[in-house]
Amino acid sequence: MKLKKKVRELTADDASQGADITTLKSDVSGLKTSVGDESKGLVKQANDLEAAIGDESTEGTILARIKALEDAQPSG
């Protein structure tokens, strides 16, 4: 009797683990979409922001425009 009960418990665990694995696969797929790559998602957004901020020597970037404004101010 105890053996049958244990087998039933283990079989039930297998079924619930299968459902958990299916859920995890779906969640991972959603994360991959959110994180994205160079063409979409968070990776693209981070790359776009980094490019917009740029550096002081790259014309048109935020840091270059700030530097130009600072340099244009009369020194006191």
Image (cartoon, grey):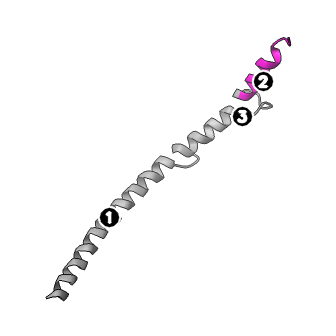
Q: Provide the residue designation for mark 1.
A: 20
Q: 26 left or right of 75?
A: left
Image quadrant in which you'd find residue 53: top right
| Res. 40 in view | no
Badge 2 density bin: few <14, some 14–19, many ≥20, Cα 10 Å? some
According to the picture, the residue beneath numbered tag 3 turns out to be 54
The amino acid sitting under disc 3 is: Gly
> At 67% across and 36% down in the image, what residue appears?
51
Query: Which x, y percent locates residue 34?
Result: 47, 47
Residue at the image point whose x is 59% and y is 47% from the top? 38
Question: Quadrant of residue 19 in the image?
Answer: bottom left
Locate the C terminus and report the quarter of the image it occupies: top right
Seen from this angle, which residue lies furthest left?
A: 1
Residue 28's spot in the image, x, y percent? 43, 57
- Residues at marks 1 and 3 touching, judged by CB atoms closer than 8 Å: no
- Please name the residue shown 62% across and 36% down the image: 49
* Image quarter hosting the N terminus: bottom left
Q: Earlier in the sequence, mark 1 or mark 3?
A: 1
Which circle's residue, 2 or 1, is located before the other in the chain?
A: 1
Residue type indicated by callout 2: Lys
Label 3, secondary structure: give it: loop
Q: Tell me what residue is drawn at x 39 percent, y 61 percent.
A: 25
Residue 62 located left or right of residue 70: left
Relative image position of residue 46 (x, y in whole percent) = 59, 41
Q: Residues within 10 Å of mark 1 (few under 14, many from 20)?
A: few
